[in-house]
Image: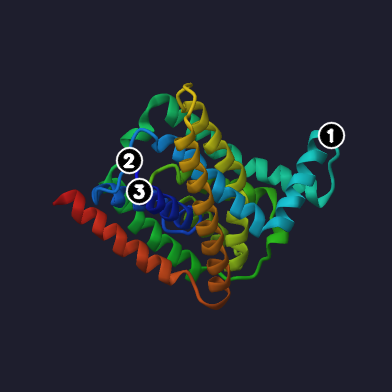
Amino acid sequence: MTLFHLFILSIVQGITEFLPISSSAHLVLLHEMGTSADTDALALDVAVHLGSILAVCLYFRADFMRLLTGTGQLLRGHLGSPESFLAFAMAIATVPALVLGGLLAVTGWIDLLRSATVIGWMMIIFGILLWWAHHAFPERRKASEWRLKDALLMGLGQAVALIPGVSRSGITMTAGRMLGFERHEAARLAMLMSIPITLASGGYLLLKLPGEQMDADLLLQLGIGAVLAFVAAYLALALMMRFLHLVSFTPYVIYRIILGGILLFIAYS
């Protein structure tokens, strides 16, 4: 893999992984433009997943530490604290995507959904749904009011995001707004929900890696990719959270519709 390909793929993946604009759509577009990786793409995918999720953990470090504390309490059978409730609710939110993802992986259906046509339509449809959810439902709830019912409903949305183009962060933010959470609070919950599912996804990809020992050049490339993805994801997160305090999701919706239209033009031409 050339440094140019490494740079482009890592930066694009880092920026788009947690914004409501679908990383899958951008990777398909890069492929159509000829910016595709080689046989080391799977290893790079693991590296950028690691870099991206580290950015989330660092940016939301207070919540992440609460989640770690609560997980430890759950494992020791200590229930009843706000931290253990957060960890339990996060587990509830993660289960639907893990179950559906396992079924899609076993049946091979997941590969059938990776097309420019599917991704293009999903970009447009779920972009419009995000716009409607933001404008149709009041902003009256904080993340501290998250309940098990909310976790399950947002988790079901996260499972739908296994369809490429839906956007995991986009659909969880949409579900959060439909449940009445303020836009930046919905984004905060969506980012916290990304931690376990992204780790699970990275672990699945890691298991698919060939068993041969990786050489020094590849390890260096993976390290560079992880760092680039970390920096890009952190900056994208910081800008998005500040942006959502000032304006709505509308700019992301417009971007989704434009990119979806481009992918559909490519698919049908």
Q: Nearer the viewer, residue 266 or 42?
A: 42
Q: Is residue 142 above or below residue 171?
A: below
Residue denoted by label 1: 76
Image location of residue 98, percent across then percent down: 55, 35
Q: Which mark is residue 228?
A: none
Residue type for callout 2: Arg
- Whichever of labels 2 and 1 marks the residue nearer the N terminus, that label is 1
Q: Is residue 215 left or right of residue 24?
A: right
Q: Secondary structure at mark 3?
A: helix
Q: Nearer the viewer, residue 71 or 128?
A: 71
Image mark count = 3
At horizontal 57% and vertical 36% (from top left) the residue drawn is 200
Q: Which amino acid type corresponds to the residue marked 3 in the rendered image?
A: His
**Disc 1 versus disc 3: distance between alpha carbons?**
46 Å
The answer, for residue 166, to whether it is visible in the render is no
Disc 3 and disc 2 in contact, CB within 8 angstroms: no
Q: Where residue 99 sits: x, y (%)? A: 53, 32
- Which residue is farthest left? 269
Which percent across, then down, holds residue 20?
46, 59
Q: Which residue is mark 2?
A: 114
**Quarter containing the N terminus:** top left
Bin the neighbour count of mark 2 within 10 Å (Cα to Cα): few under 14, some 14-19, many 20 and up.
some
Mark 1 residue type:
Arg
